[in-house]
Image: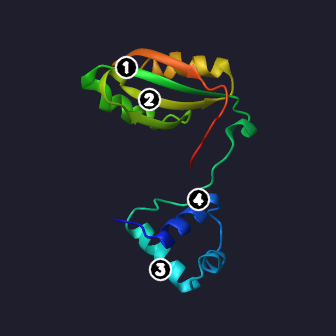
Amino acid sequence: MKLDPIDEQIISMLQEDGRRSFSDIAEKTERTEVTIRRRVRRLLKQGIIIRFTVVIDPLKTGKQIRAVIRVKTMMKQASAIADKVKDFEEVSEAFFLDGACGLMLKVTVKDLSELRQFLEKRLGRLPGVGEVETCIVLEDIKSVF
C-alpha cells in the first residue's frame, strides 16, 4: 500500500512519541481527530503500524554490555536454533541472514561475565551451533524504533 503525506506525518509523529494524542496530531496535520483515529485504525489493520510499545534504555536498567553475535549453524538445525534463541531474555533481536552469515543476534547483558555465561552455557550448548563471532557495541550511532 502506498502511504499519502498525511499517513506519513501521522506515522512520523507517533514514532517520535507513541503517546501523542490524536487531537495533537489532528491539530498539526490540520485534520479532524476523527480522521486521525480512522487513519491510525486503518494503518493498524493493514499492518503498517504493528504495535505501540515502550522503548527502554538498557544501560539505565543495569545492563551495561550490548553485543551483536553472528552464529553459524548447521543448516538442518537453523530453524530449531532460531526457535530457542527467540525465547532467550538476553536476545532483543534475531535475524536469519543470507549466505554464510547464519543468524545475527542483538544481546544485552549486565556485564562481561554474564555475556560469557550466555555464550558458553546457553547459546553454545544448543545443538547445531557452530562458529560464533561476538562484537561488543561501543557506542550507538543511530537507533530507529
Residue on which the image places disc 4: 15
- The secondary element bearing badge 4 is classed as helix
Residue 93 position within the rendered picture, expressed as x and y whole percent measured from the top left? 49, 38
Nearer to the camera, 73 or 40: 40
Q: CA distance from mark 1 to mark 4?
A: 34 Å
Q: CA distance from mark 1 to mark 2?
A: 9 Å
Q: Amino acid under label 1?
A: Lys
In primary-sequence order, the first of circles 3 and 4 is: 4
In this view, the residue farthest toward the front is 5
Tell me: 52 left or right of 130.
right
Residue 60 position within the rendered picture, expressed as x and y whole percent measured from the top left? 75, 39
Residue on which the image places disc 1: 72
The residue at the point 70 percent across, 29 percent down is 64
Q: Amino acid under label 4?
A: Gln
In primary-sequence order, the first of circles 2 and 3 is: 3
Q: Name which quarter of the figure residue 20 lies in.
A: bottom right
Residue 38: which disc?
Answer: 3
Q: CA distance from mark 2 to mark 4?
A: 25 Å
